Amino acid sequence: MGPEQNEEQELPPVTEFDAGETGTIPVVGYAYPWDVVGDPTFADRARGLGVTKVALAAAYHTARAATPLHPEHRIVEARTAALYRPVRAEAWEGARVVPPAATWVTENGSPAADPFGQAAATLADAGLEVAAWIVLTHSTHLGEADPELTVVSCWDEPYPYALCARHEDVRRYAETLAAEAVRDTPVSTVILEACGQMGFGHGGHHEKTDGAYDDTTQQLLSICCCPACREDWAARGLDPETTVAALRGATGVEATEAAIDQAALHTILASRHAAADELRRRVIAAVREAAPGATEIALHAQPDPWATGASPGLTPTTADDVDLVVSFCWPTTEASVETGRRLVEAVDGKAAAAAYVTVLPPTTEDAFGGHVRALVDAGIDQIHLYHLGLAGADRQHLLASATEVLTTAARTE
């Protein structure tokens, strides 16, 4: 269906909400710059859904994204991870790792010079709060260009999509990326994704690893064994060669649980957490200097300390450094609700707890509202909605239903 046909498609009626109606349960809707640029109806649509803030991607990984409600296109190919701001030579002078610009965000057929800045200004002018959504250590483009800076498994297999936070060049890249993302923009919040250890799991091109290994094996294959990480292990009293051999044994054809001892795993986790802590603190410091108006720092993370990926595991000090932790709760299952409970317990009142939920398939209409309510009942402070741009006309009412559920919850408390 072409754009001219879709313009005649009517969206289902959506209740207009006052952003303050949800009381103490804010609703944050996620979007890409290309959802906003070139669509004069986006801001009104978001406001009508009742979101209080739009989390807008300022630095993001490769994606092939549908745009079912956009008047100018139906799909966007984000060919590489990129910074959705001008890539200024003076900011990146001397840097080993430099992000490409996002030339695929267009308006009236021409590339937008500052996709995030333009989209953020549009939303702010419409009275919406803007959060800068920044993906830090996930870039296949940069990992392939410089494999020495990537996560490496115990089988000496690099993960090109995963930049290792142990490296100084990666830390400098991340803090510069974050600072440049928010420079001179009207953002009130910064949301950090992939701020720590990426691991084995990755939604790559035609992924053929799903279901091949159990959770324990994936956890072990997610341990970074690059030279920099091995050096840190040695400084902590762990023999790197013996440890890597044990990890191989635990993930080999005849793997046994006894192949690696728990003391070694404890040291490895402490090493990983130290790298994540250093990365997070440097990125936050850079953000606060570049955007003093960004009063809230949010972090995508999971309560499982061994978690890797876009939402890496919480470290013992994470909640001391940020204002909000957002955990992945997409499946409408009791396991996701339990993740929400564990998150609330883990942050222990030091930071707010948010649940990241999706209205996209396989989420169903009969399960979504109850799922949101169960998360709130588990103690969740915010709901983060995925995704304002990807959801078509048939899913817009589900986005609105989250606000309805939260409005009801706030009124009954």
Image (cartoon, rainbow, N blue to C red):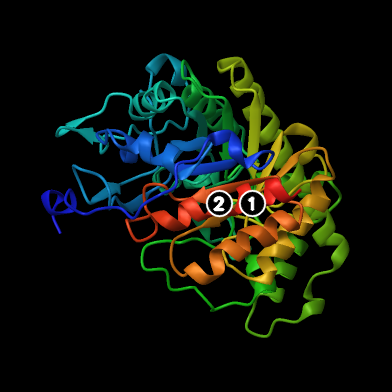
Residue at 84% x, 57% y is: 266
Residue 200 visible in the snapshot: no
| The image quarter in which residue 101 lies | top left
Reading the image, the residue beneath label 2 is 404
User: Residue pushed farthest bottom?
Assistant: 254
**How far from the left and from the top, in percent, is residue 237?**
86, 50
Kind of residue sitting beneath label 2: Glu
Q: Taking 11 as reference, is 279 left or right?
A: right
Asked whether 20 or 151 is in front, the reply is 20
Reading the image, the residue beneath label 1 is 408
Q: Taking 21 as reference, is 272 left or right?
A: right
Q: Are marks 2 and 1 in contact (CB under 8 Å)?
A: yes
Where disc 1 sits, the SS reads helix
Kind of residue sitting beneath label 1: Thr
Residue at 31% x, 39% y is: 34
The Cα–Cα distance between marks 2 and 1, rounded to whole angstroms, is 6 Å
